[in-house]
Image: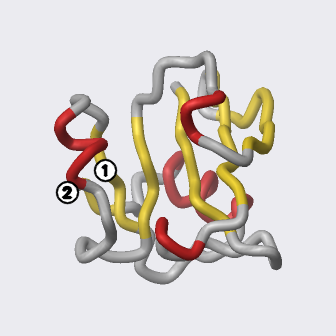
Amino acid sequence: MNIAIPLDNNSQLCKIERLSFWELCKLENGSLKESKRYENIKDMDEILDFIVVSDKNDDIEDFLDEGIDILIAPFQKSVEDIVEAYIFRELYQL
C-alpha cells in the first residue's frame, strides 16, 4: 500500500498548493515499511493507492482523474499520526 502525504517545512500535513515536499509511505501487513521524501510527486516510481489531504476542498481533481483514492485526515498532522490513523481506519475516504 502506497500513501502520499503533502507536508510543509515542519513535516506537518498541509494543503497541496503549500507543500514543501511529498512523503511516500509504504505499508505492508499493517505497519510502515519505508518512508521517503520527494520534492515532486511525479518523481515517485511507485503506483499510489492513496493521497492524504486535510480536507475535501484541497486541490485533488488531478488525482481523482488518475484513479487515486483520497483520504482525509481532519485531525492528524504528522506522518506518524496519519499512518497510525490509516492502520486503525480512522481516516475518511472521499
Per the image, label 1 sits on a secondary structure element best described as: strand
Residue drawn at x 41%, y 79% as measured from the top left: 74
**Label 2: which residue?**
94
Q: Which mark is residue 56?
A: none
CA distance separating discs 2 and 1: 5 Å
Per the image, label 2 sits on a secondary structure element best described as: loop
Within 10 Å of the Cα at label 2, are there few (<14), some (14-19), or many (20+) other Cα atoms?
Answer: few
Among the 4 quarters of the image, the one containing residue 26: top right
Residue drawn at x 53%, y 39% as measured from the top left: 3
Q: Is residue 48 above or below residue 83?
A: above
Q: Is residue 5 above or below residue 45?
A: below
Task: Say whether marks 2 and 1 touch (CB < 8 Å).
Answer: yes
Q: Nearer the viewer, residue 67 or 85?
A: 67
Among the 4 quarters of the image, the one containing residue 94: bottom left
Q: Earlier in the sequence, mark 2 or mark 1?
A: 1
Q: Mark 1 belongs to which amino acid?
A: Ile
Within 10 Å of the Cα at label 1, are there few (<14), some (14-19), or many (20+) other Cα atoms?
Answer: many
Q: Mark 2 belongs to which amino acid?
A: Leu
Question: Where is residue 36 shown, x and y percent of the image?
Answer: 80, 37
Is 7 positioned to the left or the right of 3 in the image? Answer: right
**Label 1: which residue?**
70
Question: Where is residue 48 shown, x and y percent of the image?
Answer: 46, 28
